[in-house]
């Protein structure tokens, strides 16, 4: 058993079935969780990891805000 970092719920995970870097989901809240350690089993939110992790070119992507196309023409 391991605790979900998002909702603090208990997740039943067989430590032999996961490896560091695997992604699992919480049965209670549905959060995507990344395995960051296996002895002991540690999880972190996969969504948070993706925001700060550089892409394959080494750049950190920023969220793009969608603008209304009509506003550009005014």
Image (spheres, helix red, strand yellow):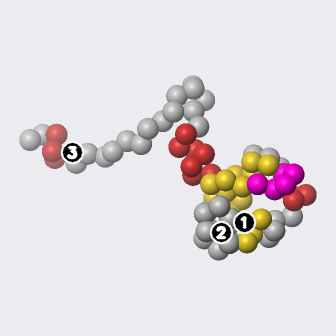
Name the residue beneath numbered marker 1. 3
Specify start and end residues of the magenta stretch as a single range.
Answer: 38-42
Q: Upstream in the sequence, badge 3 or badge 1?
A: 1
**Quick check: 67 above or below 59?**
below
Spatial CA span between label 1 and label 2: 5 Å
Of residues 25 and 70, the one nearer the viewer is 25
Q: What percent of the width, then of the height, locates residue 43?
A: 72, 55
Picture residue at 22% right of the left edge, 48% below the top: 68
**Residue 60 can be seen in this image:** yes
Of residues 9 and 46, the one nearer the viewer is 9
State which quarter of the image contains the C terminus: top left
Whether tag 1 and tag 2 are in contact, CB under 8 A, the answer is yes
Q: In the rendered view, does 8 fall on the left or right side of 19?
A: left
- Secondary structure type for disc 3: helix
Picture residue at 81% right of the left edge, 56% below the top: 41
Spatial CA span between label 3 and label 2: 42 Å
* Res. 58 image quadrant: top right
Q: What percent of the width, then of the height, locates residue 1?
A: 81, 68
Q: Residues within 10 Å of mark 2 (few under 14, many from 20)?
A: few
Say the numbered circle drawn on residue 8: 2
Mark 3 vs mark 2, foreground winner is 2
Picture residue at 57% right of the left edge, 33% below the top: 54
Q: What percent of the width, then of the height, locates residue 33?
A: 67, 57
**Quick check: 17 above or below 69?**
below
**Residue 22 can be seen in this image:** no
Q: Does the magenta stretch include residue 40?
A: yes
Q: Is the magenta stretch mostly helix, strand or loop?
A: strand
Name the residue beneath numbered marker 3. 69
């Amino acid at each position: 058993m391991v605790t979900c970092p998002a909702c603090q719920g208990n997740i039943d995970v067989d430590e032999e079935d996961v490896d560091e870097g695997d992604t699992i989901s919480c049965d209670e809240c549905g959060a995507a969780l990344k395995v960051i350690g296996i002895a002991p089993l540690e999880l972190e939110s996969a969504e948070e990891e993706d925001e700060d992790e550089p892409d394959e070119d080494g750049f950190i992507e920023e969220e793009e805000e969608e603008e209304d196309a009509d506003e550009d023409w005014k």
